[in-house]
């Protein structure tokens, strides 16, 4: 790696680590804790790459990006920040930062991105920036926070697609925040001042429904909520509706917790509608896939409750440990509802583990599904877990499409465990499961099951 890198961060440890690592890689490094000093270096023509924190003692690194682009067109800037929200990622993208990494960052990853930035700068012709100042939106109140790789990937994808005209399909389990992501894409886009219309099956129940939706949306955004639940007639109306769009048509988005490709293969969803909606697929991770974000989300919901006039609470360490290990079948929505209830019912400011257990039904769903070890039949164990799933919805029915969701939850681990048991041999696995080998291959592909480097269970 060859070049001069300007590092701006108010944390001395980070400055030291980056200076040492980049120097060993062959770069010259100028490091500062001052944004004013950084801007002076940039104006003087120093540096081939900038690595800057956001929150500095004398300013905001993100707000400095347009000025850097004006002074030095083509100078790449990598933003690093402990402000791990979707707004940080969006603002970095709007200001045309070369890259964005949340803190704590992986040093080898940052080194690779730095090397890439330097190489691109050497090859590319400097081009003027069309940076836009971050807009004021209500998104700061959204629980779209997280430093996990899954959420950072989601942020970057939202930033890339928000100002395109491509249709967006938002997928994910119930309670993950699919409609929230769709709303964020609209509110952070150039269409933010235009209508955002959420369309349900009832809005398409009559022939005049699509026309009314178009009239209401104008050239804003339309979200087809739980599009997988639309019946055949409603799907046909949506296809005709999309085919009627002109140049000033609204942005189209759809949300679904169902596997639309599987529904399409089963004849329950129109192929032409599937391809019209699937320009870009944005998958919202389940809470089980981003356990490290639970403390951040909990802090957000506790703060939100306090702003609403409720008691200021927090989890005790034993309670937080339980919350981290719980399976959260209802995802972020269930976590928020649980915290709201605990804020009201807890005896002390520090919520105890016992209080969390009481709210979650005294049977935290953290243990893997088991059968036979204690004499309990597998069917009885499954029944217990399914009843618990219903109970955790607090008297409200789960979202439609439960049959396929449960089958998928059981089918995927069954195939994975069976593959492990036979050492990855698909012929033996198909024989063990009692299904055709081609059927097994199709399920492995559909469920995206990794079959390499499997070992036989002992």
Image (tube, helix red, strand yellow):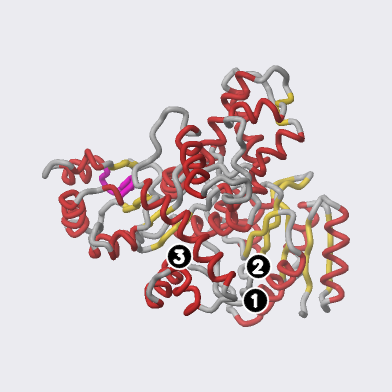
Which circle's residue, 3 or 2, is located before the other in the chain? 2
Q: Name the residue under label 3.
A: 447
Magenta residue check for 21: no
Please tell me whether mark 3 sits on a helix, a strand or a loop: loop
User: Helix, strand or loop at disc 2?
Assistant: loop
CA gap, disc 2 and disc 1: 7 Å
Residue range in magenta is: 217-227
Say few, some or many: other residues with alpha carbon within 10 Å of mark 2 (under 14 / 14 to 19 / 20 or more): many
Q: x, y (%) of residue 36?
A: 77, 52
Q: Which of 424 and 28 is in front in this view?
A: 424
Q: What element carries label 1?
A: helix
Q: How far apart are marks 3 and 2 (CA)?
A: 39 Å
In this rendering, does residue 63 appear at all? no
Rounded to the nearest whole Å, what is the CA distance between mark 3 and mark 1?
Answer: 40 Å
Crowd around label 3: few <14 · some 14–19 · many ≥20 (10 Å): few
Query: Which is more toward the observer, 245 or 168?
Result: 168
For residue 76, the mark is: 2
Horizontal side of 13 relative to 142 (left or right) equals right
Comes first in the chain, label 2 or label 1: 2
Q: Please, is residue 346 above or below residue 453 in the view?
A: above
Give me the residue at 15% from left, 50% from top: 233
In the displayed structure image, the side of residue 120 where residue 409 appears, left or right = left
Magenta segment includes 223: yes
Dividing the picture into quadrants, the one containing residue 420 is: bottom right
Height in image: 239 above or below 308? below
Which residue is denoted by mark 1 in the rendering? 121
């Amino acid at each position: 790696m060859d070049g001069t890198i300007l590092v701006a961060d108010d944390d001395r440890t980070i400055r030291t680590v980056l200076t040492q690592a980049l120097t060993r890689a062959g770069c010259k490094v100028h490091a500062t804790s001052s944004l004013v000093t950084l801007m002076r270096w940039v104006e003087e023509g120093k540096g081939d790459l900038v690595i800057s924190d956001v929150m500095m003692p004398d300013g905001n690194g993100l707000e400095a990006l347009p000025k850097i682009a004006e002074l030095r067109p083509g100078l790449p800037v990598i933003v690093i920040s402990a402000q791990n929200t979707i707004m940080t990622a969006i603002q970095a993208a709007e200001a045309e930062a070369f890259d964005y990494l949340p803190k704590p960052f992986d040093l080898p990853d940052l080194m690779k991105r730095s090397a890439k930035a330097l190489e691109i700068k050497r090859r590319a012709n400097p081009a003027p920036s069309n940076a836009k100042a971050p807009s004021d939106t209500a998104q700061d109140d959204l629980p779209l926070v997280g430093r996990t790789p899954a959420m950072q990937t989601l942020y970057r994808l939202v930033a890339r697609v928000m100002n395109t005209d491509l249709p967006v399909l938002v997928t994910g389990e119930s309670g993950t925040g699919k409609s929230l992501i769709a709303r964020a894409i609209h509110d952070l886009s150039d269409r933010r001042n235009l209508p955002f219309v959420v369309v349900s099956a009832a809005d398409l129940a009559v022939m005049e429904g699509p026309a009314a939706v178009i009239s209401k949306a104008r050239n804003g955004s339309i979200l087809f909520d739980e599009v997988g639940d639309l019946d055949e007639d409603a799907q046909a109306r949506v296809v005709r509706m999309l085919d009627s769009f002109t140049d000033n048509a609204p942005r189209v988005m759809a949300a679904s917790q169902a596997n639309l490709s599987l529904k399409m293969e089963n004849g329950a969803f129109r192929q032409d509608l599937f391809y019209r909606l699937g320009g870009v697929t944005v998958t919202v991770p389940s809470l089980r896939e981003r356990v490290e974000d639970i403390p951040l989300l909990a802090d957000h919901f506790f703060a939100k409750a306090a702003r609403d006039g409720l008691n200021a609470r927090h989890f005790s360490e034993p309670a937080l440990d339980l919350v981290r290990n719980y399976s959260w079948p209802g995802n972020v929505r269930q976590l928020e509802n649980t915290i709201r209830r605990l804020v009201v019912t807890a005896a002390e400011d520090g919520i105890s583990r016992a209080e969390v257990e009481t709210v979650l039904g005294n049977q935290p769903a953290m243990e893997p599904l088991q059968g036979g070890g204690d004499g309990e039949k597998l069917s009885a164990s499954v029944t217990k877990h399914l009843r618990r799933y219903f109970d955790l919805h607090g008297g409200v029915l789960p979202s439609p499409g439960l049959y396929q969701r449960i089958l998928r939850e059981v089918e995927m681990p069954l195939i994975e465990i069976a593959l492990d048991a036979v050492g990855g041999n698909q012929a033996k696995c198909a024989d063990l499961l009692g299904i055709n080998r081609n059927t097994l291959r199709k399920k492995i592909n559909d469920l995206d099951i990794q079959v390499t480097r499997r070992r036989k269970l002992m």
